[in-house]
Each structure stands twice: as structure tokens, then as C-alpha cells.
Image (spheres, grey):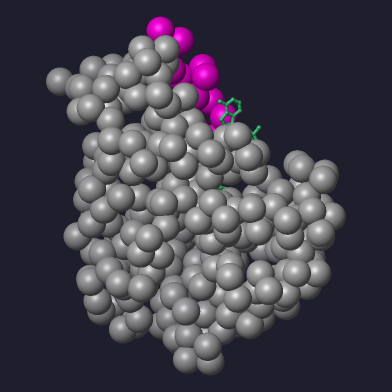
């Protein structure tokens, strides 16, 4: 088991682009438009895209793959993270029609193959188990993940929404490094900074990929206008940039998985990745969102 972060895992990535909301953008459901959007992101210096088999029931991966089909040069330029392991109730073909987790070796093997096919890729940069599964058979699952890496289908393995003991249990069964945990972290969800969860990532060498870095759109309600105005005056950043700068300033530099596909918000987020907040402002933002001062 390794606690050294994999040096080649997203070393210079300031932001990951989350694809969960792709279908909210009708124009981007056309392959040529999506290909142009991907190309524009590459020109912004952003080449990592986050998917999951459940986003649009596979449709988000498929649309992305279609874009790569119409613009094949992009296939070599993008790096894709995807996940599997959640089955929604409406996807459950059993008589129980129940949402459940399937971190099962055979299910994940198939999940990787299906994702590669939908995405029109030969290799995933990173594959994540989407949620910790109490029924996880760590030995067989670790074996399936190792096989996928050996076969060249996946470069890196990670987890998502795992607590430290959950990833440690999986790690005891493999020599493969777990490179990341994709988990919620933002001004609207800062609890992991106060219960040791955050430091566990640093100790074990798992990069934090922070989902919902803009609190899923709740920043305008969380941040008082007066604070936003004063912070903008001092830093030049709007609330999007502030939230991203706030995250990137943490030790280990968590990588935000941005959910917005809008040009303007992506540029605002990028501005945040280039800005260091004064320490008192970092705390003022936290205090406002938690509605409580640190002791
Ligand atoms: N691993 C997991 O379990 C997990 C769970 C959830 C998500 N994810 C990943 O994380 C990515 C990001 O999640 P997310 O979309 O929740 O992240 P987010 O970046 O926090 O939220 C983006 C959403 O908030 C809206 N928004 C942001 N700032 C706003 C503002 N100032 N005013 C109004 N609306 C605002 C955006 O609208 P606009 O589109 O108008 O900009 C967009 O709908 C997903 O795409 C997915 O890849 C992973």
C-alpha cells in the first residue's frame, strides 16, 4: 500500500470540468458544438473532464464520445475521469426497483468497458468507485481494478465519497495507489475541514477532487452582498472566483470539479485559481457561510 501521491496524477490541473449538467445545455448536445466547446476549454488550459455512468443515464458520456468522434484530434488531448457503482431505482431491473450500490468486481469491469465504448476512448485517465458500498468485497474489487490498469484501460484508480477507513480498507487489498477521493467540499460544505477528514487525505496521499465547489449554485444566498462587494473590491473576484480561490488555498490544493459549463463562470473560476486570498478574508468567507466564527 502506498501513501505517496502519484506524481503523474493531474499535476498541473487547476480545475476539472464536471459533465453532470451537460444535458441542461441544449446547444451542447450537438456533437459539433460540444467538440467546439471542448476545444475552447483546451485553449483555456483545461483538459480534464469528469463523468459518471449515471449522468443522464449514460447519455452524458455518450454525447461526449460523439463529440470526440466528429473531432478525433480531441481524443488524444482530453483526460477523462469517470465513475460507476450507483444504480438508480429506475435503472434496477430486479423486482425490487431499488436504488443501490454495486461496487462489485464484475459490475465494475463491465462499467469500465461500457464507459470506454460510450466515451469513444481507449483509456480512462482515472476510474472511481462512485460511493462506498457496505457490501464491498475489497479483495475481488481490488483485483478487478488492478486488471483494468494492467490491461491499459485505466491509468489511475480512485474513490469518491469515501471516508478514510473506507478507502484504507480497500487499500489494504492492493498495491495500486488510490490517487484521489472525489468528495464534496466548498464554502457551503466545509465540515471536512473540522473533523480530520481533510487531513486524512493529506496523510494518505489522496488528492481531494472537490465536487460542487460553487455549493451547487447557493453562493449568492450564502455570501452576504456587502462581503462579496468588499471582497471583489480587494481581489477583483466575483463569488465564483472567491469560492475557487478559497478551495485552492487549502494544503494539498484540492482540485475543484466545476459544474458550470458557461464560458463566463469558467473564466471567473480560472481567475480564482490564480489568486491568493488574504488570510483574514479566507476566514471571513468561511465565517459568513457557516454563520459562525471560529472559536
Ligand atoms: N462524485 C460525486 O458523488 C459527485 C456528486 C455531485 C457532482 N459531482 C461532479 O461535480 C461536478 C460539479 O457539481 P455541481 O454542478 O453541483 O457544482 P457547482 O460548480 O458547485 O455548481 C454548478 C451549478 O451552480 C450554478 N451556479 C454556480 N454559481 C452560481 C451563481 N452565482 N448563481 C446562480 N447559479 C450558480 C451553475 O449554474 P450555471 O450553469 O448557470 O453556471 C450550475 O448549475 C458535477 O458536474 C460532477 O461532475 C460528483
In the depicted structure, whether residue 9 falls above or below residue 228? below
Q: Tell which residue pokes out farthest to the top in this image.
A: 226
Name the quadrant of the N terminus: bottom left
In the depicted structure, whether residue 119 falls above or below residue 24? below
| Residue drawn where x is 78% and y is 72% of the image | 69
223 to the left or right of 83: left
Query: Magenta span has 222?
Result: yes
In the depicted structure, whether residue 137 falls above or below residue 221? below
Q: Main secondary structure of the magenta part?
A: helix
Query: Which quarter of the rendered image does ligand 1 occupy?
Result: top right
Q: Quadrant of residue 224?
A: top left
Q: Position of residue 278 (x, y in %)?
A: 23, 27
262 to the left or right of 241: right
Q: Tell which residue pokes out farthest to the front in this image.
A: 43
Q: Is residue 32 visible?
A: yes
Observer-nearest of 146 and 167: 146
Q: Position of residue 253 (x, y in %)?
A: 30, 50
- Magenta-drawn segment: 215-226
Q: Quadrant of residue 42?
A: bottom right
Amino acid at each position: 500500500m502506498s501513501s505517496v501521491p502519484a506524481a503523474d496524477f493531474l499535476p498541473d490541473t487547476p480545475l476539472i470540468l464536471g459533465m453532470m449538467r451537460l444535458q441542461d445545455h441544449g446547444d451542447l448536445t450537438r456533437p459539433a458544438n460540444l467538440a467546439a466547446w471542448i476545444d475552447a476549454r483546451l485553449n483555456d488550459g483545461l483538459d480534464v473532464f469528469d463523468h459518471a455512468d449515471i449522468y443522464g443515464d449514460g447519455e452524458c458520456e455518450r454525447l461526449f464520445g460523439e463529440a470526440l468522434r466528429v473531432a478525433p484530434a480531441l481524443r488524444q488531448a482530453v483526460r477523462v475521469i469517470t465513475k460507476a457503482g450507483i444504480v438508480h431505482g429506475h435503472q434496477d431491473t430486479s423486482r425490487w426497483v431499488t436504488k443501490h450500490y454495486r461496487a462489485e468486481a464484475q459490475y465494475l469491469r463491465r462499467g469500465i468497458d461500457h464507459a470506454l465504448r460510450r466515451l469513444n476512448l481507449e483509456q480512462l485517465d482515472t476510474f472511481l468507485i462512485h460511493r462506498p458500498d457496505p457490501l464491498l468485497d475489497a479483495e475481488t474489487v481490488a483485483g478487478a481494478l488492478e486488471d483494468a490498469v494492467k490491461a491499459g484501460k485505466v491509468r489511475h484508480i480512485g474513490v469518491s465519497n469515501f471516508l478514510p477507513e473506507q478507502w484504507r480498507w480497500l487499500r489494504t487489498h492492493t498495491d495500486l495507489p488510490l490517487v484521489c477521493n472525489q468528495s464534496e467540499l466548498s464554502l457551503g460544505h466545509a465540515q471536512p475541514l473540522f473533523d480530520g477528514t481533510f487531513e486524512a487525505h493529506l496523510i494518505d496521499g489522496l488528492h481531494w477532487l472537490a465536487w460542487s465547489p460553487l455549493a451547487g449554485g447557493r453562493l449568492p444566498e450564502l455570501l452576504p452582498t456587502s462581503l462579496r462587494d468588499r471582497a471583489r473590491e480587494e481581489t477583483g473576484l466575483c463569488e465564483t472566483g472567491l469560492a475557487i480561490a478559497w478551495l485552492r488555498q487549502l494544503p494539498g490544493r484540492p482540485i475543484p470539479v466545476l459544474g458550470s459549463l458557461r464560458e463566463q463562470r469558467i473564466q471567473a473560476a480560472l481567475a480564482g485559481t490564480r489568486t491568493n486570498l488574504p488570510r483574514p478574508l479566507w476566514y471571513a468567507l468561511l465565517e459568513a457561510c457557516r454563520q459562525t466564527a471560529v472559536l
